[in-house]
Amino acid sequence: MSKPAHFIWYELMTSDPAGAAAFYGAVVGWTIARHADPAAGDMDYRMIGRSDGGNAGGVLALNADMLAGGARPTWMGYLEVEDVDAAIDAIKADGGAVQMAAMDIPVGRIAMVTDPQGAPIYIMDPIPPEGAPEGASDVFSVTEPQRIRWNELATSDPDAAVRFYTGHFGWGQEGEMPMGELGAYRFIQSGDDTIGAVMPLMAGYPAPVWNFYIGVDDIDRAHAAVTANGGTVTNAPMEIPGGEYAMNAIDPQGAAVGFVGPRKA
């Protein structure tokens, strides 16, 4: 790749978009559209709006056929690539697999792949916004609330995963934090930004997966809002390097999600 890949979109797959809208509205402050985007055709696809007027990602409603086929509520990330078809060939040659064949949509060409350990991820060659050929996605931010702030891969083979993502997506891997007997929490970089980490698969994770942490304005307010709005806290807020706090939860429809932000009390 000529440049490191960035996460350019995030997507919540859910069985209940209205329920998800109520939950994430209360916890994060997002507004999820009440109706499907007409540009999505036959799919029920809705935009996630931030309070600053930008988009944080999208919501895909899982229909009966998708659920019957094994789809379950989850968060997915999109990585930008220069050539989706070439990326697929390289990923397959390196032990990955294709879950959704490459296809063209109004905003670019996409495919869903899994890395060699089985964690799913979208790859996308986006069409730049009209009038902004150099337009960059702002759905990820290291610091800002209402954006994804951290991307965490839990995997059965961290060494192999680091080789795979650094080799195919131009990432760096510098720095780590010990996790005792579990091993190391290894930080990953896209260009100058530390965008997340790779960690060993822990008890309770049935398979390798990407986890995403959404920025909130106050971690204790968000913690209370999770339980008050039908979610389940799986890891209570804990302090992380830099002085902020992170927590993990399951939303009311069953999607795992993380939150990160300051403690204001």
Image (spheres, rainbow, N blue to C red):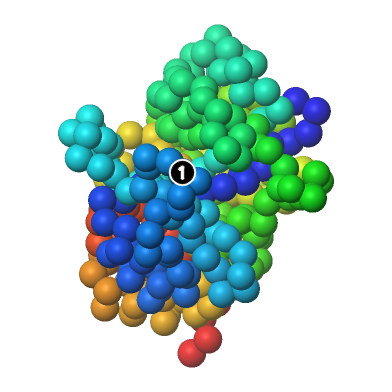
Q: Which residue sits at x=43%, y=59%?
A: 258
Depicted 8 relative to depicted 258: above or below: above
Q: Amino acid at mark 1?
A: Ala
Indicate the position of residue 63 as horizontal and vertical percent values. 25, 42
Q: Is residue 94 visible?
A: no
Q: Is residue 159 above or below residue 64?
A: above
Q: Does residue 21 lie above or below 211 as drawn?
A: below
Does residue 165 appear left or right of residue 33 in this picture?
Answer: right
Question: Is 107 situated left or right of 29 in this image?
Answer: right
Depicted 132 relative to depicted 118: above or below: below
161 or 4: nearer the eye? 4
- State whether residue 69 appears in this view: yes
Q: Residue furthest top?
A: 93
* The furthest residue to the bottom: 265
Q: Is residue 83 left or right of residue 253?
A: right
Q: How many marks?
A: 1
Q: What residue is disc 1 on?
A: 40
Q: Nearer the viewer, residue 246 or 92?
A: 92
Residue at left offset 56%, top offset 74% = 51
Q: Residues within 10 Å of mark 1 (few under 14, many from 20)?
A: few
Tell me residue 61's x, y (percent): 33, 48
Quadrant housing residue 41: top left
Residue 221 image point, x, y percent: 41, 82
Left or right: where 217 falls relative to 144: left
Q: Quadrant of the N terminus?
A: top right
Towards the viewer: 193 or 137 = 137
> Which residue is depicted at the point 47% across and 70% down?
30
Occupied quadrant, residue 220: bottom left
Where residue 122 sits: x, y (%)? 51, 34
Q: Residue at x 81, y 46 (%)?
A: 134
Mark 1: secondary structure: helix
